[in-house]
Image (cartoon, rainbow, N blue to C red):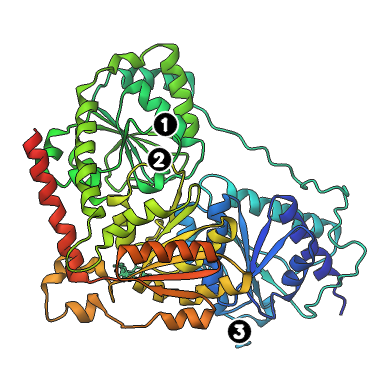
Amino acid sequence: MSNEGTTLYLGAFVDELVRSGLKHMVVSPGSRSTPIAVLAAEHPDLKIWIQIDERSAAFFALGLAKSSRQPVALLCTSGTAAANYYPAIAEANLSRVPLVVLTADRPHELRGVGAPQTIDQLGMYGSHAKWFMEMPLPEAAPAMLRHARVTASRAMMTAGTAPAGVVHLNFPLREPLLPNLDHPQLFADARRDNSQAYTAVAEAQAGLSEAVLQQLAAELSATRKGLIVCGPHDDPRFAERVIQLAELLQYPIIADPLSQLRSGAHSKRLIIDSYDAFLRIDSIVEELQPDVLLRFGAMPVSKPLLLYMSKHEQAKHIVVDEAGWRDPTLLVAARVMAEPAIFCEQLAAKLGQERKGDANADSAWLKRWQQLQLSSQEVLTEAAAAEAAGGLFEGSVVYQLQQLMNRHSTLFVGNSMPIRDVDSFWRTDDKGIRMMANRGANGIDGLVSTAMGVSAMQRGTVLLLGDLSFYHDLNGLLGAKLHGLDLTIVIVNNDGGGIFSFLPQAQLPNHFETLFGTPIGLDYEHAAKLYGGQFQRVYSWAQFQQAFQQAQASGGLQMIELPTDRAVNVELHRSIWPKLAERLAAES
Ligand code: TPP
């Protein structure tokens, strides 16, 4: 049987992915996917990253795509291999990260008849994929080669357009599976021989109409008590523009750690980073009654902020988002379908033209937020900078990292307590540290692999996570060895799920440790040995500083473990809030 169809059809498909902008493909080994894997490896302009475990592979691809802000492809064989992509696909869908997922499958005559390594792969990611297509069997007919190119181009465009997300293409493949790498027509486009895309895609930037701009400018400039709330968002143009808008309106900006507003060269005058602390105080929530909430990005991590926003139903909640419906408060009064950076630029220009911004100058509202911010910052920094009695305070690791991390490096933050501690204890700075996390589905799975993917794009990446999250993705450590990557992993080891000690189930002594605390007592030094990394366990902040500097200087896979105590940690967190309440009460 000839392999010409397999060679030319799949060759055209891979080539067109590259012409449409694909630079990275994460491949897991398998037989059914052979022709795509071989053709991808043969393509001169595509970088292949091998990952054995498909769950890690998919999270690794997520990390590559997140950090590069570009679509990344995944390829695996048929059967349960494809099912292992599921968690990362759910995360990519929810956090709007572009992935092009290619799964190999048996041809139709071998499906549902007991053939080996065959499961139902049709639409298997459900609504987590923006677009699913069952591909045809490869053929070399001219119309089919056009189909291969158009589908590749459409897959890249669909994954990358707002809201970015996941495209799944399932390929039935029949033997012989080996392509002919000497075929003279391999990767050739019948229409042209340069490297242009088969279909050029021009990106449009959706702007606001004059009428909407005018109405918003009039409304906001006449509203003194406004608040800008910035959740997770990763557009590098956004910080400067939202600040310019806030300056014109004199609105404080609530900045989630993943909004990229806490760290950078931009002005911090209007940025509030300590709201999670002072919005725990009922009298302050009561006092700070906003008239308008202008919201950008995904929902912020802070629960006190969510409760604050939900409580103030009387305020007009405006959500600016290019797509989707991200609003668990269910209070949105107006949705503006626009890219946040473009929205801010246009509205600022409009306000500037009409000199409407001055209307809110000398706002007592803004001053009150700034005053709360200053006092809260002091209390939080004092708590995080102190050497706590009774063991290492988990909040302090954030303070320490902020001092130690290099300018323009990346911090990938694990879910559970690490992201909450970063929210509480990472103050604004000018270091330009990019903050990333998997906050789409908030899983404790795949964090090592995602950070590993990020580290492949950005040197000096640091991962901060809890011990159970680390355990969950030990397989991800292989990426560093396979690809010679640098990643410093800071493991907060409280031997179990520390977050549950903050929840009501902590009061069930008979069940708590078994069901929630879940101590597993692993010695992670062995993991470092297994995967060829360096391991340091530290008991003081002085040791941590030394270990961190050493880790960053040596490069490669570095693990620093901080043993902490769950019970002590809850007490230390809880001791801060009354101190803050006292201080703010004394000042008012
Ligand atoms: N399984 C997945 C895949 N994701 C989840 N979010 C959970 C379970 C529920 N969960 C949330 S936090 C947590 C669990 C099991 C404990 C995490 O422990 P650790 O990583 O050690 O962090 P800590 O709570 O100690 O900060």
Can I make out residue 127 in this image?
no
* Front disc: 1 or 3: 1
Distance of label 2 from label 3 (alpha carbons)? 48 Å
- Asked if disc 2 and disc 3 are in contact, CB closer than 8 Å, the reply is no
The image shows residue 118 at horizontal and vertical percentages of 60, 81
Against 26, residue 436 (above or below) is above
Residue under circle 1?
242
Q: Earlier in the sequence, mark 1 or mark 2?
A: 1
The image shows residue 22 at horizontal and vertical percentages of 68, 54
Residue 363 appears left or right of 530: left
Q: Secondary structure at mark 2?
A: loop
* Front disc: 2 or 3: 2
Residue under circle 3?
117
Frontmost residue, 150 versus 415? 415
Q: Secondary structure at mark 1?
A: helix
Name the residue type under label 2. Answer: Leu
Distance of label 1 from label 2 (alpha carbons)? 9 Å
